[in-house]
Image (tube, grey):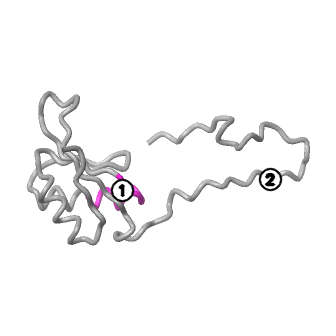
Amino acid sequence: MKPKKNTLSDLGGIMYSTDPSFVFESNEPEENSELANAQQDLRVMLDRKNRGGKAVTLVTGFRGSDEKLEILAKMLKTKCGVGGGAKDGEVLIQGDFRDKIVLLLQKEGYKVKKSGG
């Protein structure tokens, strides 16, 4: 994953400082902040766009490290017996397994909602 490039709006309006002791303090939350499963608010939906008509179950809203996302994806793929992947904070599971994935995530302690029809 490519690192995000900073823009002027990311700097909070600071463009240049003549003060040699100036230190910019970012007020963005840390990306590595781990949330407990009960604090995660996940959405489970069915997606068919740009996939040649094939259905994919999409789990969005995960906040945590890429390693934990991969572990979650592997657990869901194993329990459903299908392929899939994880990237950009989303888990893709091949096929329509919305109900099964909602139950599995609830057993793991996540707050889960079905969305998108």
* Badge number at residue 104: none
Q: Residue at x 30, y 65 (%)?
A: 111
Question: What kind of residue is marked 1?
Answer: Phe
* Badge number at residue 62: 1
Q: Secondary structure at mark 1?
A: loop
Question: What kind of residue is marked 2?
Answer: Val
Q: Residue at x 29, y 67 (%)?
A: 110
* Badge number at residue 23: 2
16 w.r.t. 32: above or below: above
Q: Residues within 10 Å of mark 1 (few under 14, many from 20)?
A: many
Q: Nearer the viewer, residue 36 or 73?
A: 36
Q: Residue at x 18, y 44 (%)?
A: 117
Q: Secondary structure at mark 2?
A: loop
34 w.r.t. 26: above or below: below
Q: Which residues are magenta?
A: 61-72
Q: Is residue 36 left or right of residue 105?
A: right
48 w.r.t. 27: above or below: above
At which x and y percent is residue 37?
A: 34, 69
Q: Residues within 10 Å of mark 2 (few under 14, many from 20)?
A: few
Give the quadrant of residue 77: bottom left
Q: Is residue 7 left or right of residue 105?
A: right
At which x and y percent is residue 14?
A: 77, 41
